[in-house]
Amino acid sequence: MLITIVADYGLGDLAFAEVRQRFAKLLPDAEVIAVPVPAFDTVSAGFCVGQLAFGDGPADRIVYANVAPRQDEEDPREDNEGEPLAAARLDSGVLVVGVAAGASMSFVAAEGVPVRGVRVTDAGSQFRSRDVFPGAVAALARGEDLLGRPVTTDPVPRRSVVYIDGYGNLKTSWHEPPAPVGGTVRVRIGDSEAQAMVSDGVFGVPHGMMSFAPGSSGWGRPFFELLLRGDSAARRFGDPAAGTPVEIIAG
């Protein structure tokens, strides 16, 4: 069994090791890997969950997402209460379990996969993803019925940045080209603008030029990427946060 933890603990943070140890105790035969996303970034988390859940891999894998900004209400929280845990089972057999916060479960729900609450406490620890939730994940993996009512998720941000990879490429929720292949467009993200060439491959532009093309990510349909060949598209656009709209302001 493969368990992938998608969380905002921070690259190399002690929290990843503690959660991995917890899973090693509960599911000792499982291989556990970690995927970090920026702090409180439920959009990046949701995108990673979708890519990992719908991508190729063993059918008995689990994608476990924990990005819980506790921003669903502004009043003081009793007993470290936060957003509840939810789960979805894909037709492929893949189990997705994640805190129902922001867009963390949205990319899965957008594909028509039912997302339901998990009958487990959502309080009792500041570090619920270590102390509370792994036990529920292990129980679901063993086939126990802990699923409750359907959960409503936020919509996937439309035509927006959804993830920034280690090369500074901006993966977006554009699924169609904004202009004919070979044409150039003016792109605005936040307060920054840059010119990009629409192409059928992210490297189909000369060195130093920006491409807007189907990238390496997607399930059923591609997610278009902005790639600055030889440099960082994210830096060129001022390092936008996931969820920032990607606008075409001129052809």
Image (cartoon, rainbow, N blue to C red):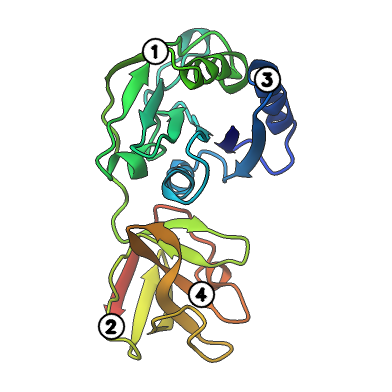
Q: Position of residue 28 (x, y in %)?
A: 69, 22
Quadrant (top left, top right, bottom left, bottom right) of the C terminus: bottom left
Q: Residues within 10 Å of mark 2 (few under 14, many from 20)?
A: few
* The disc label shown at residue 227, or none: 4
Depth check, mark 2 against mark 1: the one in front is 1
> Does label 1 or label 4 sit earlier along the sequence?
1
User: Which residue is identified by label 1?
Assistant: 146
Q: Nearer the viewer, mark 3 or mark 2?
A: 3
Point out which mark residue 22 bears.
Answer: 3
Mark 1: secondary structure: loop
- Secondary structure state at the residue bearing disc 2: strand
Q: Residue 2, image x and y in percent? A: 59, 36
Please tell me which residue is depicted at 48% across the width and 31% down the height of the picture.
Answer: 69
**First-in-chain label (3 vs 1):** 3
* Mark 2, residue position: 250
The image quadrant where one finds the N terminus is top right
